[in-house]
Amino acid sequence: MILKSIKIENFIVYDSENINFEEGLNIITGENGSGKSSIVQAIYYGLFGKSLYYRNVESFARNKAKSFQVELELEEKGKSRLEIRRSRNSFWTNRYGLRSSTDLKNYLLENYNINEWKYKNTLLIEQGQINSLIMKTERERFEEFEKIFGIDLLKQILNSSQELAREYKRRLGEYNKQEIIEKIDNMKREIDELKKKNKERENEKLILEQKRGEMKQKRKIFSSAKNLYEKLKKIENSERELKEIESYLENPENKKRYEIYEKYKNLYKDALSAKNASEEIIKLEEKLKMLENYKDKYEKYKEYLEYSNRDDVKELERIIKRGKDIKDEIMNFFKQEDIKKIKELLEQVSKEREDLLKQKDQIVKRLGEIENEIKQNLKVLREIENIKSICPICKRELDQNHKSKIQKEAKDEIERIKKERDKLNLELKKIEDKLRNIENILSEKMKVDEYYNLVKKFENFRALWEKWKEVKLYSKYEEEYKKYSSVIAIKESLEEKKKIIETWKEKYDFDYEEVIKYVDNEDNRIFFMDYEIKEQKARILKDEISKREEIQNELDRLKSHIGDIIFEQIDSIISNLDNEIEEISMQIGRIESEIKKNIEILSEIEKQIEEKRNELERILNLENKYKYFHDLCQKLEDTVACKRLAYSRNLNILVKYYFDKFALNTYKDIQILFENNGLIIKAIQENGLEVEARYLSGGEKTSLSLSIRLAISQLLDIKFKLLILDEPTDGMDNIRVESLRELFLNFIQNNPEYQIILITHEEEISDIPNAHRIHVIKGWNGSSVEIYTL
């Protein structure tokens, strides 16, 4: 991925700049304080949204501007360009899937293996920080390098794994595995003993339940025999009782009295209807006499109803109501009491409207003519302005005085016409205002016309109106009408009641009141109910007696099982059987209680076994986990050691390669060693003398630091290879600066995938051939850039 350009607005010292970058080496030059490092800050902010040199991003706003903006354009191989735009309150990219800073952060890590910390500590060399790594203690260097190469993450995993292995080992010490296995075996044997014992008791219970069943069957037979003996005795008593009841029922006097009551009871409902009808006839006839007084008022209200339902009457009432409503509206609008004067006023207004419309047409026509005159004069002015020889109006030679005169006359004519136009527009507005008022008044004309049409219609209905006013007075007889309206229904009811009486007289030759009196008599009613009860009782007794033979046969069948016993002995036999059944039930209950108790013990032991098995499973789980983390720790320790050794070897090779470009054969070797949780960096002189990195000269330290940075950038699998160096030549003499120049040329040629942004004030570096040069110019009101290629 290559940085193609950066746009910045209101950013630190820049108002608005668009800076392009090229592949390979890009050199930014300029005097101190001109804003070279601000470009680095803008790139860093665009990528990660963080501040590099400033306390916070709020400090980026130029001259306390309300907003600032940074936009990066990155070219990705095989993909469309990635644009990133950040400001104080917004974030945007041209990629659909990158809609937030978090999305971009994840994208850079997943696709280019880069994040803010890794970039800041590998590919970005801040101003004044090039020697920061060398000047740290061996322990600090060790931690820094492990973090850069990801070894610290492996160590964190290793520490966590070691802690877990120790924890699992400690927890295993809390258990005795062999003791738990022995307890499980003992409890299994105890379960087998209890199950065997329960099986024996189940067999005993089965024998007792069989014996109890036989005794219950025997008791059932004796109980059935007892019931049959009791039924036979009851039948004997029923026979005696039946003879007494039949004697009563067959008595002729009782039988005749019952038959009379039964006959009258069946007629009782019709007799009551006849009696009620007779009483209703008297009441209805009296009511008819009274209602005859309302007949005349009934007829009048009936006439009122007929008129009120007539279509012509309804139409008449609608005309009157509508006429009154319209008249009120017209009077309220015109504030007049005489509608004839309103009609005359409307005729005058209509005539005035026609006059105003004519005046309006004349003014509109004149305004059109005026516009044409203005256009003509303007056309003349344009022609005179463009023509220098012959006047287009008089066709004479056109000198300057004549030209000025014609121009003045045309302008004066335009002014005069415009004044006339303004005056006509004012007059047109007054006419239109008057027309609007007139239209408002004439809008009521339709109502006035409608009112007079309604008056004509009313005149056609005047005779009907007079009759209707008379008939409407009959509406007060509504109550009399309602009362007399019930006459027909009363007469119909009277006929029905008379028919009931006639029907009774046709059917029976005795009085209905005789029937009612006989049935309502309390002695007769009690006798009838008692007689019916005795009849029902006799039927029940006959049914019972009819079962004698069946019961006797069933009893004889049972005697074949229990023998011919005395009836009085049965209760004693049943009682003895009950005692024996109860004793057996108690024995069964004791066995069931014992079995239940054993089952509870079994359940408890099984729970204990399950707990021990779970405990054993936990032990096995702990053993597996301990073994897993113990083996993992060993592998992680080996991996950490291998990574340290590999990175140490590769660093030594690459650092020595780059350092040789600077050291001018002063040192024959560079050694980078991981020892005792420390990182030793030393240079070996030709005479074998070792010099610790921090004790090298300023230029040597800078050369070594830059060599280490370049080596790290090549060792890490970072796919975004934008190397930024902000003033990396601190402490270097001219010879080493010249060596640095040669190093960059060599580095770019051998590593074309890298893009380098170098900020420097050293002329020896800034004139590298084929470099893309960006020169920052410091102005009194901000900085600007110039771009050219050397």
Image: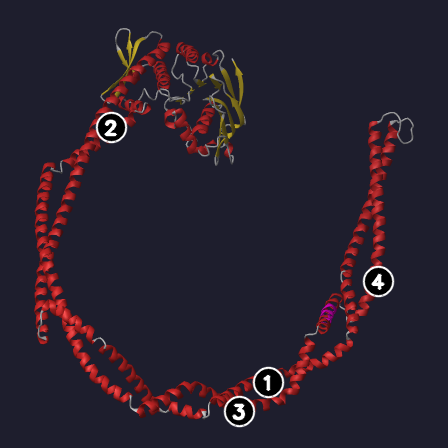
For residue 300, the mark is none
The colour style of the image is secondary structure
| Marks 1 and 4, the one that precedes in the sequence | 4
The alpha-carbon separation of the residues under discs 2 and 3 comes to: 120 Å
- Say which element carries label 3: helix
Q: Secondary structure at mark 2?
A: helix
Residue designated by label 1: 487
User: Which numbered circle lies on residue 158?
Assistant: 2
Q: Position of residue 446 (x, y in %)?
A: 77, 62
Q: Would you call the spot at circle 1 few (<14 residues within 10 Å), some (14-19), or many (20 or more)?
A: some
Distance of label 2 from label 1 (alpha carbons): 115 Å
Q: Secondary structure at mark 4?
A: helix
Residue 19 spot, x, y in % from top left: 52, 23
Mark drawn on residue 348: 4
Amino acid type at mark 1: Val
Circle 4 crowding by C-alpha within 10 Å: few under 14, some 14–19, many from 20: few
Q: Is residue 646 above or below residue 378?
A: above
Compared with 283, 684 (above or below) is: above
- What residue sits right under mark 3 in the picture? 282
